[in-house]
Amino acid sequence: MQTTYDPSSLYPEFGARIYGYLRTHKGKEQLIWENGEDSEAGEDFLANVPDPSPSLPQMLERQAVMQCVRDCIASLPAPYRAALLLYTVEGKTVEESAAILGCSKEAIKVRLHRARYLFKSLVIELCEVTVERGGDVSCVPKELLKESTS
Amino acid sequence: MNCREFVESLFEFCRGELGPNETALHRAHLASCTKCQQELTETEACFAMMKSCCGTEKMPEGLQQKLHELMAGCCGSRK
């Protein structure tokens, strides 16, 4: 006996429309999920659905970039790093950062400026940075570029 | 407003922490100064990069409090 997967039973509001679309465009046989002869049709149907997750090389590159940026932050002197992390990562204001670290707003601003310049020079030293139109920044560790070319 | 004044309050401007009058003054200066435009772009890019690489994990409130105390101890003002 054949069992038919009918999405309309799961999502009554949208189900009828989805099912109608699939029947028209994908063919009814592809909606049949069962053990036996027609199981390949079901697998083919699923194989055609694109995987939204990033590919393994993309994930590894992202991991390398994250590690590189974290290394740059870790190389900063502690007072600069603290001000920078409070402001950028934790989202504290200059005033809140000053209250947490027990120093003046001006001291926090000076630290943020110095930390920003140091961070920039470290990133440029370790990574290939390109600023695209619209302000998007792409950063690839130089070590990763060496590995891919050799 | 000159470049020095702009850079002094750059971080507040980035975050929208300034009042409307000060923000308008900053915007007017920014429109005519390419050096400060570059400064702003670089600052925002640096901060966006850091946030995207370090801001993915959320720590518990208690741990955050302890960390802030430690930070104040080692990175606060020198007395």
Image (cartoon, rainbow, N blue to C red):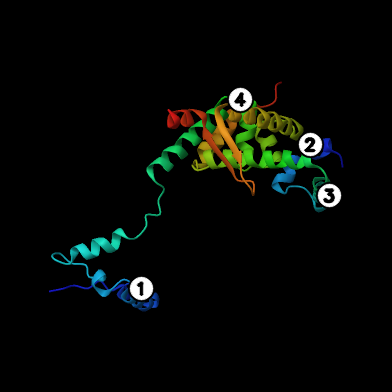
- Of the residues tagged 4 and 2, which is closer to the observer? 2
Residue type at mark 3: give it: Ala
- Of the residues tagged 3 and 4, which is closer to the observer? 3
- State the SS at label 1: loop
- Give the spatial CA distance, label 3 vs label 2: 16 Å
- Of the residues tagged 1 and 3, which is closer to the observer? 3
Residue ID for mark 4: A78
Residue at point 74%, 32% (across, down): A104
Q: Position of residue A96 (x, y in %)?
A: 68, 40
Q: How many labels were placed on the picture?
A: 4
Task: Tell me whether marks 4 and 2 sit on the same chain.
Answer: no
- Give the spatial CA distance, label 2 vs label 1: 56 Å
Residue ID for mark 2: B8
**Residue A95 visible somewhere in the drawing:** yes
First-in-chain label (4 vs 1): 1
- State the SS at label 4: helix
Task: Tell me whether marks 2 and 1 sit on the same chain.
Answer: no
Quadrant assignment, res A148:
top left
**Residue A90 visible somewhere in the drawing:** no
Task: Tell me whether marks 3 and 4 sit on the same chain.
Answer: no
First-in-chain label (3 vs 2): 2
Q: Residues within 10 Å of mark 4 (few under 14, many from 20)?
A: some
Chain on which label 4 sits:
A
Q: Mark 4 near mark 1, Cβ–Cβ under 8 Å? A: no
- Give the spatial CA distance, label 4 vs label 1: 54 Å
Compared with residue A8, is residue A57 higher up or lower down, i.e. above or below? above
Which residue is at the far front?
A150
